[in-house]
Image: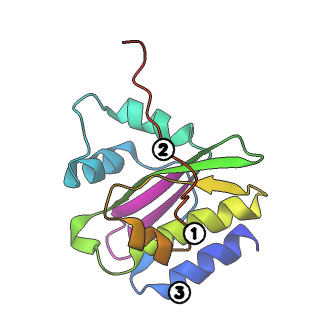
């Protein structure tokens, strides 16, 4: 499936919302969305979030058609061959429960699959299992997510 076809499916699926696979997103809007969902740790700047997004392999984003406002995104880190890790699924609180998050997951994972990437994972916080399974994800019972904090 071509990228344009994927976008058309999701643009027509949710009234008033448009989707994009363009990584070049206004860093001011990114910071505002992170702030609305309280994910900021205080060190982010327009320059750092711009770098985060441009260094991502792919970014799926959602915009309010009427205002042009960024209302959600999901990005992927990848080697571009076999593995991708999807991170930072954010949807503005006033736009939740409308299917935007699910659309972003499916849009990004479909794009990655189209690129030939077959090992696509994300780690959700406890309680999000049902959401990700409803989006086509499978719990990896034989794998344990690990986090590294550097030298201690």
Q: Earlier in the sequence, mark 3 or mark 2?
A: 3
Quadrant where the N terminus lies?
A: bottom right
Relative to 137, is 141 above or below? above
User: Does dot 1 land on a helix, a strand or a loop?
Assistant: helix
Across and down, in percent, residue 39 comes to 26, 45
Is residue 8 in view from this perspective?
yes
Measure how far apart labels 1 and 2 are at the Cα level. Answer: 24 Å
Magenta residues (range): 59-75
Q: Nearer the viewer, residue 13 or 18?
A: 13
Q: Secondary structure at mark 3?
A: helix
Q: Is residue 5 left or right of residue 128?
A: right
Specify the quadrant that holds the C terminus.
Answer: top left
Residue position for label 2:
145
Nearer to me, 145 or 78: 145
Q: Is residue 47 magenta?
A: no
Whether residues under marks 3 and 2 lie with C-beta atoms below 8 angstroms apart, the answer is no
Q: Check the image and name the residue furthest to the top.
A: 152
Q: Which callout, 1 or 2, points to the residue nearer the camera?
A: 2
Q: Residue at x 44, y 27 (%)?
A: 148
**Residue with the mark numbered 3:** 12
x, y percent for residue 67: 31, 70
- Is residue 101 among the parts visible in the rendering? no
List x then y, in percent, for residue 7.
60, 74
Dividing the picture into quadrants, the one containing residue 55 is top right
- Residue neighbourhood size for the residue with mark 1, other residues' Cα within 10 Å, grouped as few (<14), some (14–19), many (≥20): many
| Residue at image location 39% in from the left, 24% down from the top | 149
User: Does residue 16 appear to the left or right of 142 in the view shown?
Assistant: left
What's the magenta bit mostly, secondary-structure-wise? strand
At 45% from the left and 37% from the top, the residue drawn is 50
Query: Number of labelled discs?
Result: 3
Numbered label attached to residue 107: 1
Q: CA distance from mark 3 to mark 1?
A: 13 Å
């Amino acid at each position: 499936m071509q990228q344009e076809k994927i976008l058309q499916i999701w643009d027509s699926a949710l009234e008033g919302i448009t989707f994009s696979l363009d990584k070049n997103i206004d860093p001011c809007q990114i910071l505002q969305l992170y702030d609305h969902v309280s994910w900021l740790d205080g060190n982010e700047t327009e320059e750092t979030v711009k770098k985060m997004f441009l260094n991502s392999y792919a970014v799926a984003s959602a915009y309010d058609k009427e205002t042009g406002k960024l209302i959600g995104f999901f990005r992927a880190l990848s080697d571009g061959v076999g593995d991708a890790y999807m991170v930072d699924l954010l949807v503005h609180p006033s736009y939740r429960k409308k299917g935007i998050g699910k659309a972003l997951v499916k849009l990004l994972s479909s794009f990655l699959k189209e690129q030939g990437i077959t090992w696509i994972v994300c780690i959700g916080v406890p309680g999000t299992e049902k959401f990700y399974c409803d989006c086509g994800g499978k719990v990896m019972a034989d794998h344990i997510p690990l986090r590294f904090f550097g030298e201690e």
